[in-house]
Image (cartoon, rainbow, N blue to C red):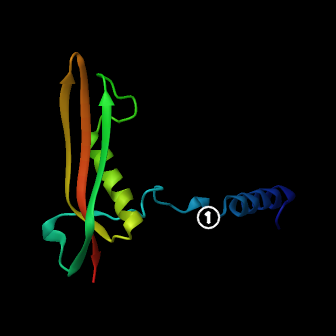
Amino acid sequence: MPTSRNIIIALCLLLAVICSGCSLLPTRAGGSNLPPILAQDELIRPYVQLGRVQITREVYGIIDPEIKPDLIEWGHSGIRAEAEKMGADAVILPEVSGTTTNYLIVPTTEYRATGIAIKFK
């Protein structure tokens, strides 16, 4: 015979499951729908090049408060986001670079990330 305590516990568990809904299911990060970056040996299907994707950022001075220490992660996520805007399925040949130039005594650094957006046939 179920006691009132068991019924209350069962109702609380049922309420917790109903309130949590799909939040118990694992989800991907917000940027998970971005096209992946593929190496040349991963390309086994024919594709069409949509165009070259490039992002740049100029920093004046020594410290850049907006860029994370991982420059490659910044570049890859940026070109993936731009490729998604083009409707690409993937990005190939990614390149991330940074060049520093001194104007008088103020250093200027330009970060650049490029890649080729592709769509599979």
Q: Secondary structure at mark 1?
A: helix
Residue 66 percent location from the top left of the image: 40, 34
User: Is residue 10 at all visible to an observer of this figure?
Assistant: yes
Task: Report the residue that reaches farthest toward the front.
Answer: 104
Residue at which label 1 appears: 22
Front position in the image: 112 or 92: 112
Residue 85 percent location from the top left of the image: 41, 64
Looking at the image, is 49 positioned above or below residue 11? Answer: below
Q: Please tell me how crowded label 1 is: few (under 14), some (14-19), or many (20+) other residues with Cα within 10 Å.
A: few
Q: Residue at x 79, y 61 (%)?
A: 11
Looking at the image, is 87 positioned above or below residue 71? Answer: below
Q: Residue at x 39, y 28 (%)?
A: 65
Image quarter for residue 18? bottom right
User: Is residue 117 at all visible to an observer of this figure?
Assistant: no
Q: Residue at x 23, y 78 (%)?
A: 47
Residue 13 percent location from the top left of the image: 72, 59
Task: Report the residue that reaches farthest toward the bottom.
Answer: 121
Say how many tags the image has. 1
Residue 48 is left or right of residue 32, and the answer is: left
Image quarter for residue 37? bottom left
Front position in the image: 90 or 87: 87
Amino acid carrying mark 1 in the image: Cys
Residue 76 percent location from the top left of the image: 29, 52
Figure quadrant of the N terminus: bottom right
Figure quadrant of the C terminus: bottom left
Q: Residue at x 48, y 56 (%)?
A: 30
Task: Report the residue that reaches farthest toward the top.
Answer: 105
